[in-house]
Image (cartoon, rainbow, N blue to C red):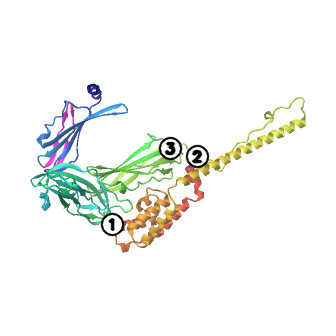
């Protein structure tokens, strides 16, 4: 045992200089930037080293905050031979006043953290009779009025001055909304009506899908709590305690339709922030006729669920061919709600040399902070393409130059048997053999090409995720819903049917189809459906028959694209 302790001490002693040799990082972060007066929050300090007798200087914090708790932890990790160490201090702070308070830079040796600003808001005076109880629920939102599909932050808090056994808490479940859970509950302490409570706060992002009045129903907390007379009673079956049931208040939200000033022919995106980023592969890109260059566009948005981000516009030009890859969506929970990202990549193949222009990329969005329309854009770009338009040989023609046959290719006859008749006979035999070799070579090449094409066709058919059965079923559901004037079911099954017929799994809404098919009548029909869904257009004014007619146009467009005459152009874009 003593030997192990000595070995461990020796290991730590070796670790300390290794750690010190690396650049030391010392950072500070908080679990929230807004807190009600009387509530606590958590400040986390991190140092990239093992701290034994070294501590951060916390004196500056105590001017505006009370330090309720200070927990320190140390970690050492060895990953692939790389040693990393870390020390954390988790401080529970209670603000001393209201307003904007600053956590000043905290020194640790010769390192200092950055200052952090925390907003301390005035605590609301609750008139609820349960606010003086041992356990109660409280619910609130960051907004009382939003646009359709705009983010609402919903807070559900459990206040308790005693432990609750067999606890069960119902989470929000609301029709015509998308609800995202923003991580685990945040624990802190709060002073309320002269009592100190332990609080667990749960956060949710709610996205209403329909304008009008939205009611967030009351959540219910149930469980059992021990009474003062039963606190020390032995209860082997865990039945001691008084059953309780607590409810939060209902919250009413006004959901406004899409503003009339928003463009009609672009997807509706309400967000706090939105930006576009562009990357190329290779970097920097070099453009040559017939050679692909990969362009990746990333849309970052704050306050929008990733499932609500629409497809990005794909550049269209007579000078390029574009082949999109499968898009990807990701989202994480942040202090301002959901941070979403949509990434789309596509190969760009120039079809002619010289100077060509890549069109500008524009995404319209509604800034919910300023209540104004904004446009995120990537400017048009002029690129120089090397090479010239090339004419490729088709797969159906294989040109093989015939070998030249002359007298040198024929072995001279033996002197003993040399005669004009013998020489002529051997010459014809050589010609026949050479012709047979040429014919065999051509047949072999033709056979291999047929086999390769058949193999590729078989692989594509085997791995296809689309089926004629799903196509038929979704079209039947779409037609039935559209004829019955059921806009939500029409939207759902139109998108599913379009995804099948266009063989594009990224299609999740009728608006996404507009980015793939340019048709004036279809654009008008889909915008009419969107107006009924999101702009309070009366149902009896919806021209549902026009959307049914346009579905037949889509089938005709797809049929024309699949015409065998176009197969060669699809395989060889340089010929178009």
Mark 1, residue position: 535
Closer to viewer: mark 2 or mark 1? 1
Q: Give the left or right position of residue 390, taking residue 70 as reference.
A: right
Whichever of labels 2 and 1 marks the residue nearer the N terminus, that label is 2
Eyeballing the image, is 210 above or below 568? below
- Give the distance between the C-alpha atoms of the residues marked 2 and 3, in whole angstroms: 13 Å
Numbered badge on residue 390? 2
Give me the residue at 37% from left, 54% from top.
Answer: 363
Of residues 356 and 408, the one nearer the viewer is: 408
- State whether residue 573 appears in this view: yes
Find residue 549 and name its label.
none
Q: Which residues are magenta?
A: 98-120
Neighbourhood count class around disc 3 (C-alpha, 10 Å): few under 14, some 14–19, many 20 upward: some
State the residue position of label 3.
Answer: 385
Q: Is residue 434 above or below residue 536?
A: above
The percent position of residue 526, horizontal first and vertical second, equals: 41, 65
Q: Residues under labels 3 and 1: Cα distance?
A: 46 Å
Place residue 19 in its image quadrant: top left
561 sits to left or right of 313: right
Give 442 or 314, whichever is nearer the viewer: 442
Q: How many marks?
A: 3
């Amino acid at each position: 045992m003593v030997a192990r302790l000595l070995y461990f001490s020796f290991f730590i002693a070796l670790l300390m200089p290794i750690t010190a040799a690396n650049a030391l990082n010392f950072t500070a972060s908080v679990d929230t930037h807004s807190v009600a007066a009387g509530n606590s929050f958590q400040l986390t300090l991190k140092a990239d080293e093992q701290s034994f007798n070294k501590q951060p200087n916390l004196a500056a914090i105590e001017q505006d905050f009370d330090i309720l708790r200070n927990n320190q932890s140390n970690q050492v990790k060895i990953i692939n031979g790389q040693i990393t160490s870390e020390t954390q201090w988790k401080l529970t702070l209670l603000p001393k006043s209201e307003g904007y308070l600053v956590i000043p830079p905290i020194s640790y040796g010769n390192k200092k953290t950055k200052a952090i600003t925390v907003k301390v808001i005035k605590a609301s005076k609750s008139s609820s009779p349960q606010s003086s109880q041992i356990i109660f629920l409280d619910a609130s939102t960051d907004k009382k009025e939003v646009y359709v599909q705009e983010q609402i932050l919903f807070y559900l808090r459990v206040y308790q001055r005693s432990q609750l056994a067999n606890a069960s808490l119902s989470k929000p479940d609301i029709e015509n909304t998308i609800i995202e859970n923003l991580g685990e509950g945040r624990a802190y302490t709060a002073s309320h009506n002269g009592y100190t409570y332990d609080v667990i706060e749960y956060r949710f992002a709610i996205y209403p899908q329909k304008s009008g009045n939205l009611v967030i129903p009351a959540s219910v907390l149930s469980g059992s709590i021990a009474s003062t007379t039963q606190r020390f009673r032995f209860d082997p079956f865990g039945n001691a305690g008084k059953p309780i049931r607590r409810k939060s208040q209902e919250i009413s939200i006004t959901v406004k339709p899409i503003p009339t000033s928003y463009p009609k022919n672009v997807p509706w995106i309400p967000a706090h922030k939105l930006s576009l980023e562009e990357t190329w592969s290779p970097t920097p890109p070099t453009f040559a006729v017939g050679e692909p260059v990969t362009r990746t566009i990333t849309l970052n948005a704050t306050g929008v669920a990733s499932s609500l981000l629409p497809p990005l516009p794909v550049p269209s030009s007579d000078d390029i061919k574009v082949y999109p890859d499968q898009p990807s969506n990701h989202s994480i929970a942040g202090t301002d709600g959901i941070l979403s990202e949509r990434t789309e990549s596509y190969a760009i193949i120039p079809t002619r040399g010289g100077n060509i222009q890549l069109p500008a990329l524009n995404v319209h969005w509604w800034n919910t902070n300023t209540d104004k329309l904004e446009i995120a854009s990537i400017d048009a770009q002029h690129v120089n393409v090397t090479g010239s338009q090339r004419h490729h040989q088709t797969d159906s023609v294989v040109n093989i130059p015939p070998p030249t046959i002359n007298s040198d290719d024929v072995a001279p006859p033996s002197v003993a048997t040399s005669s004009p008749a013998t020489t002529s006979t051997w010459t014809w035999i050589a010609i026949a053999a050479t012709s047979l070799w040429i014919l065999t070579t051509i047949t072999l090449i033709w056979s291999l090409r047929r086999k390769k094409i058949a193999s590729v066709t078989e692989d594509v058919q085997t791995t296809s995720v689309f089926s004629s059965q799903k196509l038929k079923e979704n079209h039947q559901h779409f037609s039935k819903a559209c004829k019955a004037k059921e806009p939500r079911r029409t939207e759902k099954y139109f998108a599913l049917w379009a995804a099948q017929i266009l063989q594009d799994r990224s299609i999740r809404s009728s608006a996404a189809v507009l980015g793939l098919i340019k048709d004036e009548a279809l654009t008008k029909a889909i915008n009419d459906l969107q107006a009924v869904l999101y702009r309070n257009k009366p149902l009896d004014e919806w021209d549902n028959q026009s959307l049914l007619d346009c579905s037949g146009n889509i089938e005709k467009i797809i049929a024309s694209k699949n015409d065998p005459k176009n197969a060669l152009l699809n395989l060889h874009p340089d010929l178009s």
